[in-house]
Amino acid sequence: MTAVILQARIDSSRLPGKSLLLLDGKPLIFRVMEALNQVPADIRILACPEDSLASFEPLAKEAKFEILAGPKEDVLERYCMAIRKYSADRVIRATGDNPFVFADAAAFLNDEAASLNADYAGYTELPYGAGVESAAASALLRACEQAKLQPEREHVCPYLYNHPELFNIHRPPAPARWHYPDIRITVDTKEDFDKAKELYAELKNEQNRYNGETIIKKYAKMF
């Protein structure tokens, strides 16, 4: 079973409450879930801290995501709670900062990872905010047992790709059609969010608005 697991929290030091800021009338986190609904998977889960559960629960339900609350800082454990609860064997990891995630690139990466039996897969040199990571659930469970450093637990996958002697790692450059490392489409600051509002307004009527090449072309024309 493949699970999209989206990590998100309400508080943010650089852009307070950003997950609930409205992007064309809907909270940012809802727009992220909309994009992730275009990624082939058996189940989609919003994994959040306890203090975000009440705010996120109705949005997850509307987006047809399961929701699970776990430790605020130990995000790796939060992922493993979801793996255990829903019996996932492969995980597509996504974050709540990215309403323009490339759904086609995510599907391509996950298929590639599964075909290679990769414990971890992630493209390098995508636009910042466009990508996901794919990981074997068994590798994440092993990391959860062994990882001790705070960054390894907060960012979920570093223990995997920092230990290539233990895990099968696949980290190729993004294919040419998505290879635009100088583009920034994440939402981390007010400036990012203002740009996201402009970009979303231009994309919302596009038939293929979750397609990476469509997003890149629109971004290049605007910025």
Image (spheres, helix red, strand yellow):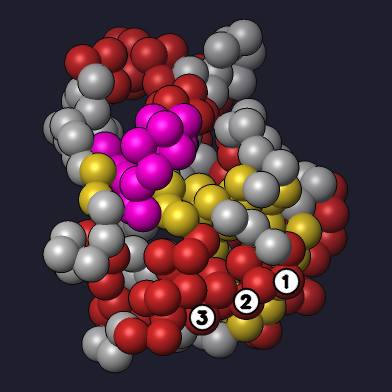
Residue at 73% x, 71% y: name it. 85
- The mark found on residue 85 in the picture is 1
Answer whether labels 1 and 2 touch (C-beta < 8 Å).
yes
Q: Is residue 195 visible?
A: no
User: Which residues make up the magenta segment?
Assistant: 110-123
Q: Nearer the viewer, residue 35 or 85?
A: 85
Q: Which residue is mark 3?
A: 77
Q: Which residue is drawn at the image coordinates 43% and 26% (left, top)?
A: 108
Q: Position of residue 206 (x, y in %)?
A: 58, 11
Q: 218 or 209, which is in the foreground?
A: 209
Looking at the rendered structure, the kind of residue marked 3 is Glu
Q: Secondary structure at mark 2?
A: helix
For the residues marked 1 and 3, what is the alpha-carbon distance in whole angstroms?
Answer: 12 Å
- Depth order, front residue of 219/39: 39
* Mark 3 vs mark 2, CA separation in Å: 6 Å
Asked if residue 60 is positioned above or below residue 100 in the image, the reply reads: below
Instruction: Determine crowd level at label 2: few under 14, some 14-19, many 20+ residues with C-alpha closer than 10 A.
Output: some
Let me know if residue 85 is in the magenta part: no
- The residue singled out by tag 2 in the image is 81
Q: Taking 195 as reference, is 59 above or below it?
A: below
User: Residue 71 in the image: x percent, y percent?
Assistant: 56, 86
Residue 112 is a magenta residue: yes
Q: Residue 96 appears at what percent x and percent y? A: 51, 56
**In this rendering, would 209 be left or right of 115?**
right
Quadrant in the picture for the C terminus: top left
Q: Secondary structure at mark 1?
A: helix
Residue type, mark 1 in image:
Lys
| Residues marked 3 and 2 touching at CB (< 8 Å) | yes
